[in-house]
Image (cartoon, rainbow, N blue to C red):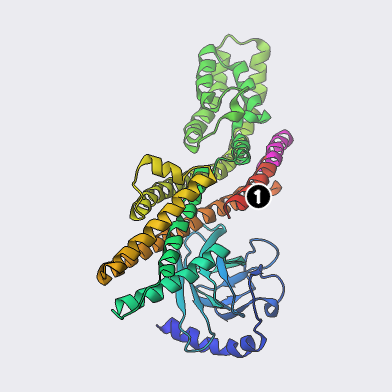
Amino acid sequence: MRTTAVISMLLLGVLTTVNASAKENELVFASDFEGNRLSQPWSWIMGCQFEGAEPHSGESALLCAEGNSSIVSKYPISEAGLLEFWVKTQNTQTQYRINVLTSPVLKLDAQWQHVALIDITPGANEYLAHRVSIDDPSRQYIRLDIESINGPISLDDLSLDKIRLDMALQKNEQKIIGGILDKLKADKNYEVQSESFRTLGKNYAAQLESQRQYLEYSNAIYSSITFVLATSERNKMSNPMGYNTFRSVLSDTKRVASPIQQARLGSMVKPFGDLATATLNVVSAGAYSAFAEPFKSFLAATFDRSNYDNSDLSRSDKKFAEENGLKIYQQAERFMSEIEKELQQVTALDNDLVSMQKNLDTFRKDLDKHLRGYLQHAGIARTPENYSRVMSKDEQTRALVITEASANISAKAEALLASNSNAELVQYMIKTTEKIDEFQEFKERFNQITSAMLTFYDKFERSIATEQNPFTDPSDRAVWEQHAQSARNYIRQSKEAFTKAFM
């Protein structure tokens, strides 16, 4: 309550300038927070500044202080659709909540409508993408109320897309349906027109196509060949067998090792694959951790004088071990420290992928179940045949199911009206509109999935930037960069395809 009161008081300070310069028909805007404060489409109510922020792109971002802060759009936005922005915490202990609100007016007594709450727990301090569907065809001011705990946050690259036409039409239809429902609830003598029921049927049936698309998205989101190639190249960069330094260490060690030591060495490096296939293997953090310290101990023992003095090595090999043992061990230790840094980044990306895959699988299963129940409410039996018709690649087949569902919904409502069963009609319309509204949850969940995917692309691209090359040896650096160039090309193509297909 205290925060709301403070925000209301501070709003007074921006009302005059905002109202004086408000633009008509502002459909879409974007803010990368470059330039001065006056050029921004946002007004800082409290708690935010340019100084000290870490940009996601460009040279500027907005720093929102620890505690409460708030920004509001300078202009009412027409047809607000999908809000997207990027947030970075100062440290791994920082957590934040961002409340997205809308209002048709910018007044001290304005009633702000809650749209979404983003609640991020401590753990990461990399930039995360967030996406929120506003889906409002009317003119609305947008406000972000931010609460940051244990440090400030940086906010950057904020954009708002225009609402999709089908969503705008659906919202308008829902207002019409809501008006009918209110009159029926009041038990007034209100003649419900057949056209209104047809609108209800069309609105209900139209979501079948949307649900099919989301299911197809969830099945295809990771399957592009460019994404597979990008992650494959990234995995190659963490495999020690791909680098000259490591292969040289193995070769030198085998030179002075006994047959049993050579066998032991072979079993130790087996998880990484042989030279011909090693670059296709994914190195896990567990496999490397289990390998690293035992391998260094093995090296130290192999190049110990007591080991090679009592062996059947030639004089030249013994001299090689004496002169180069320490250097080889130090070389191996340096390389293993470098490859471990690389592996940490790859492991983090791999963990993100696993988490996203789990979320996507759960989303797909839940939406599949919802779709089957959605069909049943429309008077279409939950049979495999009917489900296949909805998911068919043939547009005419899908259109027939949509027409059938629309007709069934309308016919059911008209039959209840004709029987003077107002109570049953109200219940049926409530249930139907609830079914329609339930799909909104899946849209928000898909926004979270696409946000996670955008964050993954961003982290992936940053991890293969030239300055991230961890190696000292020129040949190792060249190998890393060669894979990085391929990975950059593949991930760029994958991101472009993802944005085009799923955004």
Q: Could you say which quadrant of the image residue 429 lies in?
A: bottom left
Evaluate whether residue 120 shows in this view. Answer: no
* Residue type highlighted by circle 1: Glu
- Residue at (31, 80) in percent of width and height: 189
Q: Residue furthest front?
A: 418
- Residue at (70, 63) in percent of width and height: 58
Magenta-drawn stretch contains 187: no
Q: Residue 420 in the image: state x and y as whole percent.
A: 26, 70
- Residue situated in front as seen by the camera: 325 or 106: 106
Q: Residue 482 in the image: state x and y as whole percent.
A: 71, 37
Q: Residue 435 in the image: state x and y as whole percent.
A: 37, 60
Q: Residue 279 in the image: state x and y as whole percent.
A: 61, 29
Q: Residues within 10 Å of mark 1 (few under 14, many from 20)?
A: few
- Residue stretch rendered in magenta on the structure: 469-486
- Residue situated in front as seen by the camera: 146 or 426: 426
Where does label 1 land, which residue?
Answer: 496
Which of the image's four quarters has the N terminus? bottom left
Magenta-drawn stretch contains 482: yes
- Residue at (63, 22) in percent of width and height: 276
